[in-house]
Amino acid sequence: MSIEIASVTKSFGSHKALKDVSLSIPDGTFFVVLGPSGCGKSTLLRTIAGLEPIDSGEIALGGETVARDGYHLEPERRKTGVVFQSYALWPHMSVAANVAFPMETAGLKTADIKSRTNEHLATVELTAFRDRKPADLSGGQRQRVALARCLAQGAKTVLMDEPLANLDPHLRGAMEEELAAFHKASGATTLFITHDQREAMALADQVAVMWDGEILQVAEPDVLYRRPTSRRVAGFIGRSSLVGVEVNHVEAGYANVTLAAHRIDVDCPNDTRTGSATLMLRPEHLVPSVGGHGLKANVERTIYRGGFWEVFVAIEGLTEPLLMTLNRPAAPGETLFLDILRGWILPEQLAFSS
Ligand SMILES: Nc1ncnc2c1ncn2[C@@H]1O[C@H](COP(=O)(O)OP(=O)(O)OP(=O)(O)O)[C@@H](O)[C@H]1O
């Protein structure tokens, strides 16, 4: 089921938790809302599920309006399944009974309930665990029961609120793969909420970056990383250095800029103008040059990250050091000569000049 959110606002007292949020999520998409704690992610999910009324705007699921000024469709009639961090399983019921429960309350025939329970348990690979109680399962297995129960509710849309937050890093990795497999098997539109950008990158077809009740950018993970539209998104997704440059001229997708008295070519949005701008450099954009040419850099400090070193280098004429990576240790004070491969001019040129 597609999810359409148009200009939705929601306040708690004087606090605006959702400020004019609009999103269009096509049917079958694995859509991740990524943002820091308190930015309004859970509130957004709760308004879609119907657990929270909206103040203004409109929400439609599969083309049917479920919330608009003065209209609020009950959560149980929205065909959305919600998976929380806490799993919310019935502790006294077996795995199979937990999965069967929504179908029993919906009044399905016993034979149907049995066959569908088997089917859903098979989808999440828990057939062998059907008679266990939730307490006797691992966190990841409990999460899968919650997913199977979503399927049993006939959920065409699955809403997940940081479902992996309580799991240890090893299990998280395994669960990410399972969630991807679950999404493929069920075909349900999935809205997944997290503050973990690594998780968002690994799972999403599309990511919306949320900040202080607003959506800053919606894009595929790779586009978000390579082409952020603002300093905030650039800083929130991955590691980067932001540096002031002068754009000399612009030509079909790239700009020639002056960075600390050096002229280099970098990628840029189509509407880039000449003048002051902000250049985003990912660590991999800075590489040691062959033959001792290039930008002269002085190593300030290094951090070993396991297999590689993060190196902060000072460049004459720049106030802040740039971040790069090396596959060898470098000593503070060491001189490096660097080539700058690409980089990206942020579209918000005015923000830098002001
Ligand atoms: N029922 C409520 N009453 C008052 N304020 C609320 C209520 N629910 C949420 N808020 C406030 O709205 C803001 C957004 O909360 P929300 O839970 O949506 O954030 P979040 O991005 O999901 O954060 P987290 O990742 O920490 O769960 C917060 O400032 C929160 O304190």
Image (tube, grey):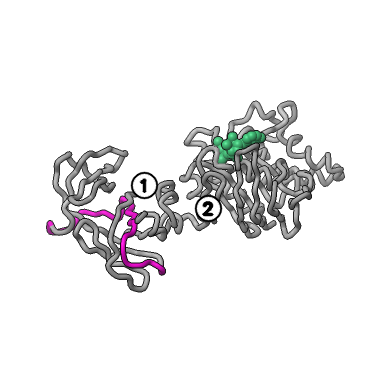
What amino acid is labelled 1 in the image? Arg
**Residue 271 shown in magenta:** yes
Q: Tell me if residue 120 can be seen.
A: no
Left or right of 302 on screen, residue 159: right
Q: Are marks 2 and 1 in contact (CB under 8 Å)?
A: no
Along the polypeptide, which appears first: circle 2 or circle 1?
2
Find residue 239 and name its label: 1
Q: Residue at x 53, y 48 (%)?
A: 210
The CB of the residue at mark 1 lies under 8 Å from ligand 1: no
**Residue 231 shown in magenta:** no
Q: Residue at x 67, y 39 (%)?
A: 146
Q: Does residue 352 sit above or below 14 in this rendering?
A: below
Q: Residue at x 24, y 47 (%)?
A: 319
The residue that mark 2 highlights is 207
Q: Tell me if residue 269 can be seen.
A: yes
Q: Please identify the quarter of the rendering in which residue 266 is found.
A: bottom left
Stretch of the chain drawn in magenta: 270-292
Left or right of 283 on screen, residue 172: right
